Amino acid sequence: MKRLMLAAASAAAMVAASVTAALAQQPTVDNLERLGEFKTTGMTEIPMVPQTGPKADAIKRNLSKIKMPNGFKISLYALVPDARHMAVGPQGIVTFVGTRKTKVYAVTDRGKAGFAEEVKEFAPSISFSIPNGPCFSKDGFLFIAEQNRVLTFPAAEFFYESPDVAAFNVLKKGDLIPKEHESYNHTARVCRVGPDNKLYIALGQPFNVQAKDKVEEFDKLGIGGIIRVDREGKGREVYARGIRNSVGIDFNPKNGQLWFTDNQVDGMGDTIPPGELNRATQAGQHFGFPWYGGGKIRTVEYKEDTPPANVVFPEVEMDAHAADLGLSFYSGRMFPAKYQGGIFSAQHGSWNRTDPVGARVMFTSLKPDGSADKTEVFASGWLTENGEYWGRPVDVAQLKDGSILVSDDLAGALYRIWYEGR
């Protein structure tokens, strides 16, 4: 009996090995390629995210702690796991939400009731890798900037109802950055389609302060900068350099100028260097890093080196280590005139500071010449007085009705802020 059992086990092992070998010889199916050829992937179900329960109830209670100017209200819009950057569809049908993990979510307020009835995975058959940055063109093309790839989804607002969606490479893996420069650090990409109809992508460099022998190569590639390509991925050029890690970009609709946040060097102290809100007025400008760690504060590593000529310093110096991330120009009419044409930006909150700061939404008004005027706290309360985070804002996006959404990757939620005052 024992010999029979051993023989059976041996035979089973041989069969398993042969099956494994046969499978290994079969070509793997790339779902992205199938979707690009308008073929089905075999997926029939779309995973959904429940919108009710104890977590939703707890978040709603916590929102009573948020402080905003008189007349503004805030509510839970949707539960979205790991919610990062957002892209509101130009038709106003659905909001796409990226993550720093492997999923993208489609959020729908079908009844226009001020909250989402439905949150589900978008393009669930695609293997995403840190799909942090969605953005839209005015004609309805969704772009998603991943760690090392950029995809486009034509008519995403309409295809999203199906598990299979039209999808194509803009920049395939290895074309966004060389594979040898892939890192686990500073990998959250963001994008915008500019007034020139080109795609702009921010590429954070992977170090706190990079070694001197990497500066020239990174500058050439646009790592630690903002690149732009046409919507088919051609004509790549470096638009801005000297940026440590920008995780928020947007264009001023009045003059087409590009604004972006930048996260400053860690480990220099609690109060230095400052965070940054920057304005690029033309292509080719240099914003100081790594010679400057934030604002006009020189880095230790480059303090004896001569910075590039004509460095552009920040329009606004933010609190050190508040982690300024997503931003959005406000073009709506719901909010009072003070806010129209200004910038809402999210501070994720500090880790490299004795006394935490951030976890709030800031507002920056602009002067008639398009430069920054005043910056103030708009919404706060996600960081408690004892230094505990119950939420960490990431991005700000505007809905069609003029209200704004704020994403929170700690709570896994989107919040809607609207105005009821006079």
Image (cartoon, rainbow, N blue to C red):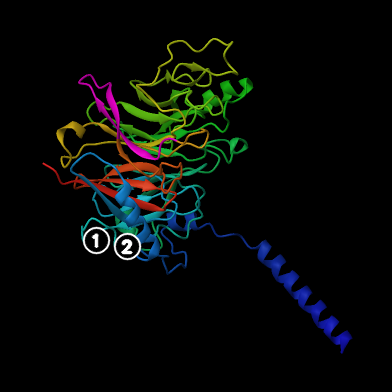
> Is-magenta flag for residue 368?
yes
Residue 110 - label: 1
Question: Farthest residue toward the left?
Answer: 422
Q: Is residue 405 left or right of residue 209?
A: left
Secondary structure of the residue carrying tag 2 is: strand
- Residue 124 spot, x, y in % from top left: 45, 60
- Which quadrant would the C terminus be assigned to in this image? top left
| Most foreground residue, 230 or 69 | 69
Tell me the residue at 52%/39% (across/down): 187
* Majority SS type along the magenta span: strand
Placement of 327 over or under 280, stated as above or below: below
Stretch in magenta:
357-377
Disc 2, disc 1: CB below 8 Å? yes
| Most foreground residue, 320 or 407 | 320
Secondary structure of the residue carrying tag 1 is: loop
- Residue 166 spot, x, y in % from top left: 39, 55
Residue position marked by numbered label 2 in the rendering: 118
Tell me the residue at 55%/40% (across/down): 174
Within 10 Å of disc 1 (Cα), the crowding (few <14, some 14-19, many 20+) is: few
- Residue 328 spot, x, y in % from top left: 30, 37
- Three-letter code, disc 1: Arg
Placement of 284 over or under 385, stated as above or below: above
